[in-house]
Structure formats: C-alpha cells, structure tokens
Amino acid sequence: MERGVFDTASYLRLFRLLKEKSPSLGEKRKLYVLIPALREQDIIEKTVLQFYEADTPGFEIHTAIITTLREKSTGQPTTEEIVTHSAKSGKLSEFKDKIQIFRDPDMYGNMATQLNYALGEIRKFSSSDALYIVYNADSIVSQATFEKLYGLLAENRGKEFVFQQPCAYVREMSPSSGSFQNALSLYQSWYCLGHESRLLNEYGKSLSNPRSSFLGIIVGHGSGMTLNMHEKNGGYPSKLLTEDLTFGFMLSANKVPILLLPTLELADVPAKFATFISQKSIWFWNYLGYFDCYKAARKKHHASRLLILLLHGMAAGGYWALSAVFIALPIISGIILRSPLILCVSITSYSLFVILPQYALFKKLPSILHQQGFETTASNMGNTSFLKILPALCLVTVTDSIGPWIAISKRIAFFFTRKLPQKPKTED
C-alpha cells in the first residue's frame, strides 16, 4: 500500500516539478561530467558527444572518461583508445580540449576508486568550487538536465549541497524489445521516480528539524557536487562493493543537503532474467555496507543519531528482502486455505497497489519524456503494449527479493573468505 499510494504521489509531484521553468544564474560555471567506463567501446563516443550537444550557456562542460587497468587490449581497441582516436580525428575532435582521460591505477578497484582517483587528479588543476556530475556510459540526458541544474544553483546561490537526478530506465523500452526487458524497464522506473525521489524529499524536510535524522540517498549516476564537497566528506567508500548509497550514509551523517535535480536521465536494464537477479544482488550490497559506514562515522559523530540512520538503512533493506513475500504470501495462503475471500482480497490489493500505479506511470511517462526532449524514447514507449508485458511485470515484482537473499548468502561467505563477489558487466 505504501508503494502504491505514496510513491505514486511522489512521481506525480516530480512530474509537476519537471514542467517548472528554472531561474537564471547569471554566471558561467565549470562542470566536469565523470564517466567511469569498463569495456564500453560500442557506446562511449556517442555518450560523450551527447553532453556537448546538450550544453547550455550556463556551463563550461568538460568530460572525464575514467578507464581502468582491468581493461586490457585483446586485439580490439580499448575504451580509452576509442576516445583517444575520436578526439584526434573523429567526432569528438571538435571538443578535444575539453576531454580528459584518467586511468585508475588500482587493478582491484571499482567504480568508487575510479571516481576518487579522477577527482583527486582534477583537484590538482581546478578550483575547489568546480562542479561535477557522474553518469554511466549508458546514460542519456537532454538539454533540460543542464537547464535545471543551472536553476538549482541559482535557487541555492552561496550554499553547498549534493544533487541527485532521477532516472527513467526506459532507454531500450520499445515494441521490438523483449517483454521481460520492457517490464523491468517500467518496474525500475517506478521505483526510482516514485520511491527514491520520495526519500530525497523526506530527507530534505528532515534537515530543517535539528532533532530529526533521516537517511538520505544518492544512487551514483545522476549525482554530483563540488570538488570541495566530495573531499570534505571523505570521498566515495572504496573498500565496499558499491559506492553510492553508502556515500549517501556518510553525507547523511554529516547532515549535508541532498537536493533533487528535477530532470530525467535515461538508462537501460538487463535483458535477461539471470542478469536482473545478479544486478539486484549487487545493489543490495549497499544495505549490507551501512554497518561499515556506521562504524566509520562513529569516530566523529554522536552514536545515537547514527544508530537511527543505521536502522533506517536496515529497515529499507529488510523491506526489499521481504517485498516478494508481502506480495506472494497472501495469494499463496488463499490457495492453500482454499479461501476465495483471501484470494480475492490479495489479488485485488496486488492489482491496486502494484500493477495499477505502474500502469499509470506507463501512460503518463511518454508525454513527460517528450517534454524533456526524449522524443524517440517517448514514441517507442508509447507504441509498447502494456498487456504484452503484464505477465513479465508480474514475474519481476514477485522475484525482486531473490537478488537480496543471494547477496545475504554471499555476504556470509565473504565473512569467511573476505573475497568480494564480481560485479556484472553493467556498472548500474
């Protein structure tokens, strides 16, 4: 019920914010677009190019492609070589003076070590008030992103804050994509646009009350801040498997404002069920890493307030791990007890609070995408049949807890082996 009612109200509120015009800042700011990359040869050139095509007069945009020693040449050009060649004589040559490549020297590193290394290098030649924003290599943005960021800076002139852009995972959603991929695109968009944007809003309200503690979040891609803000808060936790929600914990411990950037980023989702489960298990490691962040933050913060943040994180993880149980158990109980009443109430509740909110998003989102400048994606989504993806959507909702339980089992194994599991190819 919480997801169906409050998250639906949240994404409707977000859509209203997307339509509002942004004020003028009146000054030009340097903005670094950070793109951690690992074997992204097929899309990296197009990804980098889009940021210069979407540029606004308010920013001087520089892109920083962050490669890693883990990507070695195997007879085909590496991601770094693709960018270097394009900057010399290809589509990126026009912007070669605004493109930098950093290679993370940590052979056993991850996205956090890539980001921390590049930001450390950028600080050597850039002022501390320079801004950065992080995107995955599969991210798509429009000019609206920079216009809204420009407005957010104007509204909060003189203040330091972190910003987080919501993501619609509908990059590959179309009639030609598989039903499972389309269903997962809708489900993941529902979670991000509804649930995560609501958490950001609630965190912002908690900052106005000195007695209130609420766990804020960032989700990696689509987030940013000044170089100074990154350094003051210790950088991304690099010894954990994932870096985003755990960094959000540290920001929350420091009571750093995390503001919603009201514009959309597009990304894709796995096309296969096994990859979906694997990706979810990796994402759940964020929640398993909160206790490590709690121990680190206790060195300089009051334990009681940090305990509240830890409990918020653990409760959110527990809710996710049990989400499928909340859906399946009432339906299974009705079948086992042979109770038409329980079965009818269970299916009705599932339809009202899970399927109907996603159908509403499915119908509403294409017009929002069009307004944001994503005409092709809006058209593709508008031409997709909801009925065709409905069975796969039911599968996604009732199996969403499998990944978390796999993560819990791997965490137990990690306790004995101290060996982190491998992340899937996608850096989401």
Image (cartoon, rainbow, N blue to C red):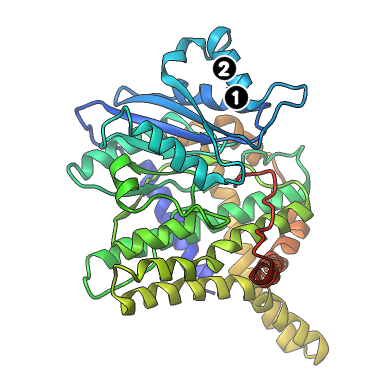
Q: Kindly identify the amino acid type of the residue bearing the numbered disc 2.
A: Thr
The residue at 57%/46% (across/down) is 110
Quadrant containing the N terminus in the rendered view = bottom right
Residue 80: numbered disc: 1
Q: Position of residue 102 (x, y in %)?
A: 50, 29
Residue 84: numbered disc: 2
The residue at 66%/46% (across/down) is 269
Q: Residues within 10 Å of mark 1 (few under 14, many from 20)?
A: many
SS for callout 1:
helix
Left or right of residue 267: residue 345: right
Q: Contact (CB < 8 A) between labels 2 and 1?
A: yes
Residue nearest the observer in this picture, 262 or 410: 410
Left or right of residue 74: residue 108: left
Q: Kindly identify the amino acid type of the residue bearing the numbered disc 1.
A: Glu
The residue at 29%/67% (across/down) is 300
* Residue 118 lies in quadrant: top left
